[in-house]
Image (cartoon, rainbow, N blue to C red):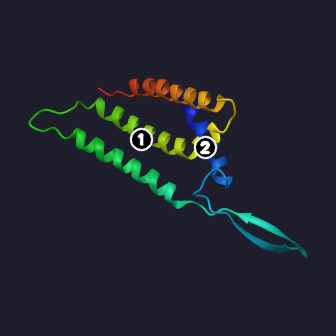
Amino acid sequence: MIFVPFMVMLLTSMIAMTNGTQSPETRIQSGQVSVNDQSGQVTTSPINVSDILMITAVVGLAVGICVVMAIKVFGSGISGSVIPIVFIVTVLTSIFVLLSGMSFNVITSIPFGIGYAFYFGLMIMYVVGLTGLASTSGGD
């Protein structure tokens, strides 16, 4: 159930990245191209490397949080079964927030408030799916 919101957000963020009016970060460059004695206008969109770096930083931050939480000070700390849950929740929530930010304008542009209701439904599906996924990931 958790994969449905991720797939919807991923697809709508792809739409937002290809549509210059929805995403202000996308810079569309045009150029004149000639192929086989025919010329035409071509629109290209550069790859946004900052999103890839942001996802890498989020995963690194999640690993760092899990390492810090795993340290036992004076015999106290959290058990080993909580660390995978914290890691999964941190990584998936970070990716969901990133995809949500990129696709929010596209989803909420659906008229008559249907977009907001759809977005709220995706968030509910994400929370329920994350709860189910995190509860089955315990180790000890």
Residue 87 vs 126, above or below: the answer is below
N-term mark: 2 or 1: 1
Residue at screen point 34% across, 48% down: 61
Residue 35 vs 61, above or below: the answer is below
What number is the disc on residue 91?
Answer: 1
Residue at screen point 75% across, 72% down: 31
- What amino acid is at disc 1? Val
Provide the secondary structure element on which disc 2 rests.
helix
Q: Looking at this view, name the residue that lies furthest to the right.
A: 37
For the residues bearing labels 2 and 1, Cβ distance under 8 angstroms: no
- What amino acid is at disc 2? Asn
> Percent x, y for residue 123?
52, 30
Towards the viewer: 2 or 9: 9
In which quadrant is the N terminus drawn? top right
Mark 2: few, some, or many residues within 10 Å (few <14, many ≥20)?
some
Residue position marked by numbered label 2 in the rendering? 105
Towards the viewer: 103 or 136: 103
Residue at screen point 40% across, 28% down: 134
Residue at screen point 40% across, 48% down: 59
